[in-house]
Image (cartoon, rainbow, N blue to C red):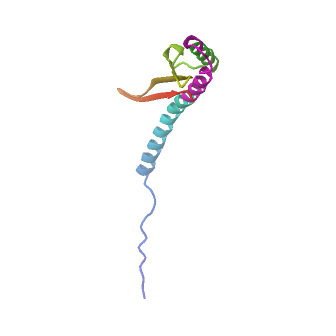
């Protein structure tokens, strides 16, 4: 009895490895650019929650600006905040955009918005 084993090559080709490497590198670069904007959004959210302790609009904006200077917030300032009252509570809301240049004419636009708790 003779049996012939067909053993085909298995695995990924060099071109496949290069393609996967390029995709992973691109995702890594994009992630490295997006993560700081998300961290800044979280910092802005904390600053807005602290600023709502003010009783007047100028006081809320002043508290936010002081916190922004300490936490190095550059995307928005106190004048960009919208201050309203709901059920006798101060509510501070904000919205802004960040653009990340990808390549050539391509940009990734991130839109952030939030309000105080």
Q: Residue furthest top?
A: 58
Q: Position of residue 11 (x, y in %)?
A: 46, 59
Residue 61, located in which quarter of the rendered image? top right
> Which of these two is toward me, 76 or 109?
76
> Which of these two is toward me, 21 or 33?
33
Task: Examine the rendered structure and indicate whether residue 4 appears above or below residue 37.
Answer: below
Specify the segment rendered in magenta. 41-59
Task: Examine the rendered structure and indicate whether residue 75 appears above or below residue 112.
Answer: above
Q: Position of residue 111 (x, y in %)?
A: 44, 28
Q: Position of residue 37 (x, y in %)?
A: 52, 28
Q: Decide whether the magenta segment is chiefly helix, strand or loop.
A: helix
Q: Residue furthest bottom?
A: 1
- Give yes or no for residue 53 being in the magenta stretch: yes
Residue 10, located in which quarter of the rendered image? bottom left
Q: Residue furthest front?
A: 87
Position of residue 44 in the picture relative to residue 97 (left or right): right
Q: Residue at x 44, y 29 (%)?
A: 110
- Give yes or no for residue 104 being in the magenta stretch: no
Q: Residue furthest right?
A: 70
Q: Position of residue 67 (x, y in %)?
A: 63, 18
The quadrant the C terminus occupies is top right
Task: Examine the rendered structure and indicate whether residue 19 appears above or below residue 40.
Answer: below
- How many marks the image carries: the answer is 0
Task: Examine the rendered structure and indicate whether residue 57 appears above or below residue 110.
Answer: above
Q: Residue at x 43, y 88 (%)?
A: 1
Q: Residue at x 46, y 38 (%)?
A: 26
> Which of these two is toward me, 5 or 108?
108
Q: Residue at x 41, y 49 (%)?
A: 15
């Amino acid at each position: 009895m003779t049996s012939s084993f067909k053993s085909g090559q298995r695995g990924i080709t060099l071109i496949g490895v290069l393609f996967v490497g390029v995709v992973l590198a691109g995702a890594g670069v994009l992630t490295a650019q997006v993560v700081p904007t998300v961290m800044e959004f979280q910092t802005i959210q904390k600053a807005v929650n602290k600023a709502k302790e003010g009783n007047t609009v100028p006081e809320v904006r002043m508290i936010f600006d002081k916190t922004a200077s300490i936490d190095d917030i550059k995307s928005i300032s106190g004048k960009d905040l919208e201050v309203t009252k709901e059920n006798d509570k101060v509510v501070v809301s904000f919205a802004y955009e960040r653009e990340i240049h990808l390549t050539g004419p391509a940009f990734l636009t991130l839109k952030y918005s939030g309000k105080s708790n």
